[in-house]
Amino acid sequence: MSEAVNPRTGTGTGTEAAAGAAAGVTVRVPAKVNVQLAVGGARPDGFHDLANVFLAVSLYDEVTATPAAALTVTCEGPDADKVPLDRTNLAARAAELLAARHGIAPDVHLHIAKDIPVAGGMAGGSADGAGALLACDALWGLDSSREELLEICAELGSDVPFSLVGGAALGVGRGERLTELPVGGAFHWVFAVADGGLSTPAVYGEFDRLNEGMTVPGPVASPVLLDALRTGDATALAGALANDLQPAALSLRPSLAATLAAGTDAGALAALVSGSGPTTAFLVKDAESAESVAAALVASGTCRTARVATSPAAGATLLG
Ligand code: ATP
């Protein structure tokens, strides 16, 4: 990393930083909520078969790639101190995988402007992986096909392909084999951000523990839910929201029950744990209701903060 760069803000001093910023490529990437997360039993490889209905929401990270002497990562934002800046960062891994495929060195500075809660079950790391991939592809002039980028995304992690695609999609297998879904209108959401994260593997481990000795049915996408998305019917979607990981997340973090209750008491149409949690998601009827539910959640003292968002949101998008 250049000594002139502050690792948490990514800002540098002098002409070197200014020239780097001028040559940079920025990609905006959305967070996701799983409107249905149907989880099958553990497979021999330890993964679970899923029927995972993803919906991209309007909370975004931005990843900027600029030429550098070596691969470096910086991050800014309220949760920046929780983001690894080494090669385990999914953005760095994306740059390495893309460069390796093309036999070039991954010499790039990746700066993440992070607005997606970290370890919150909203696929923030996956978003940064997809964003870095698209940004490096543009910076290096590789012009990879959508299929090539999706292949690398699947290698990076189960949620990464969806971060590239956005909108709404059904993911099967580990969740990475995607079919895009039509969405007939805008949905309004409030997300209650909890203090601290929950480890996704730990939540799946708890799911296995809770289901020990039981036959877990094969995961299937709900036709009612897919229809609610297609017609843009928020009330029908509220009735069909389902997350099989919710009991495991609540078992590891019982205090989330109070957050869920605070949102529904305040008028949300439905509440659920987002992915592996601990972020909780509240579907509301309109923008006005989103503001009042968010205010009530903050006032309840059951979460760190509440964020308002809409869906669907576009996938990874080059901003220039
Ligand atoms: P998912 O919803 O896909 O299960 P999540 O939203 O719960 O993921 P992330 O924000 O992706 O969780 O972070 C999970 C862990 O991944 C973090 O604790 C961190 O150690 C690691 N990580 C790697 N790269 C990143 C990144 N770019 N941003 C955030 N976390 C990252």
Image (cartoon, helix red, strand yellow):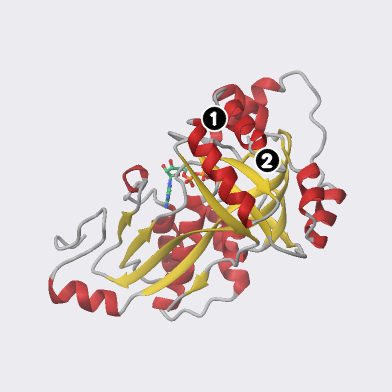
Answer above or below: position of 239 versus 15: above
Indicate the amino acid at tag 2.
Gly
At x 24%, y 55%, the residue is 7
Q: Which mark is residue 259?
A: none
Does residue 221 appear to the left or right of 136 in the view shown? right
Q: Which mark is residue 202?
A: 1
> Residue 202: percent from the left, percent from the top?
54, 30
Q: Which mark is residue 267?
A: 2
Mark 2 C-beta to ligand 1 under 8 Å: no
Viewer-closest of 274 and 316? 274
At x 61%, y 64%, the residue is 313
| Cβ–Cβ under 8 Å for marks 2 and 1 | no
At x 67%, y 27%, the residue is 247
Label 1: which secondary element: helix
Is residue 158 among what the camera can see? no
Indicate the amino acid at tag 1.
Ala
Answer above or below: position of 65 versus 215: below
Kindly indicate the quadrant of the structure image that contains residue 241: top right
> Residue 317: percent from the left, percent from the top?
52, 71
Answer above or below: position of 287 versus 20: above
